[in-house]
Image (cartoon, helix red, strand yellow):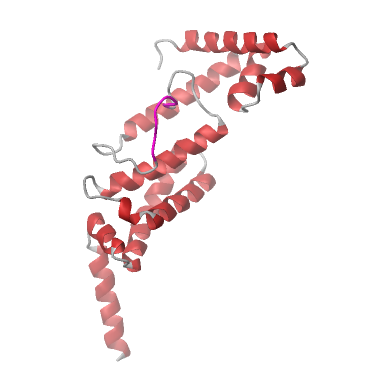
């Protein structure tokens, strides 16, 4: 009896492993938890690698991937088979990663982080996620950070405090003991210098 049960378990495992992603999510939408477990097994490693490269932080990437699976679990019925499941789950993970980047204020100055666009956690793009675009965005961020480091100290410190640490102009004024107008002027001039140096490079 025990042997028969083991054989059935192996058969089920093989069956799930052979399923397409779309079949798995369809089964999970019918409350099949084993299908969800297979999705986690299939995507956990590759999502951690993907998010880890975006953030350059594997520990945070693991937390974001855990949140990605939680959102898939809670919102399974929001997936519609108008796009590949891989596109959907990568979009969720990518949006969470970008939210983390914004939270840290590692951002650029000319829509490199797409600040002007409205993003939804479950928006389904028309095609597969553009990995090359993600890599290009990361390179652009590194260029901006390098240019910040080249600024004169009186520009660099206000740019870091304002654009990376997200302190208010008033807080910076109090911290550096300089007039509010001077802080605003230095921030604007620092940004202008960075934009000029990066013109044509990104």
**Quadrant into which the C terminus falls:** top left
Foreground of the two, 100 or 51? 100
Question: What range is drawn magenta here?
Answer: 114-120
Q: How many marks?
A: 0
Q: Hey, which residue is sitting farthest right in the picture?
A: 177
Residue 199 can be seen, yes or no: yes
Q: Residue at x 36, y 64 (%)?
A: 37
Q: Residue at x 31, y 82 (%)?
A: 6
Q: Residue at x 55, y 29 (%)?
A: 105
Residue 83 sits in quarter: top left
Q: Please provide percent x and percent y for residue 137.
A: 41, 27
Magenta portion: prevailing SS class: loop
Q: In the image, is residue 128 above or below residue 142?
A: below
**Quadrant into which the N terminus falls:** bottom left
Q: Please provide percent x and percent y for residue 69.
A: 41, 54
Q: In the image, is residue 176 above or below residue 134?
A: above
Q: Please provide percent x and percent y for residue 118.
A: 39, 31
Foreground of the two, 77 or 95? 77
Q: Residue at x 31, y 67 (%)?
A: 32
């Amino acid at each position: 009896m025990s042997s028969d049960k083991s054989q059935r378990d192996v058969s089920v495992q093989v069956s799930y492993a052979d399923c397409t992603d779309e079949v798995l999510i369809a089964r999970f939408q019918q409350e099949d938890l084993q299908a969800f477990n297979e999705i986690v097994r299939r995507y956990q490693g590759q999502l951690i690698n993907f998010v880890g490269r975006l953030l350059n932080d594997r520990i945070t990437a693991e937390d974001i991937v855990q949140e990605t699976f939680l959102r898939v679990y809670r919102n399974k019925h929001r997936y519609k088979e108008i796009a590949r499941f891989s596109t959907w789950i990568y979009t969720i993970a990518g949006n969470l990663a970008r939210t983390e980047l914004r939270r840290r204020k590692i951002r650029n100055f000319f829509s490199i982080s797409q600040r002007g666009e409205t993003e939804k956690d479950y928006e389904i793009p028309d095609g597969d996620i553009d990995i090359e675009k993600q890599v290009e965005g990361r390179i652009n961020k590194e260029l901006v950070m390098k240019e910040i480091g080249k600024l004169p100290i009186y520009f660099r410190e206000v740019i870091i405090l304002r654009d990376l640490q997200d302190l208010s102009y008033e807080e910076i004024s109090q911290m550096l003991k300089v007039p509010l107008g001077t802080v605003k002027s230095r921030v604007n001039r620092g940004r202008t210098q960075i934009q000029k140096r990066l013109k044509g490079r990104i």
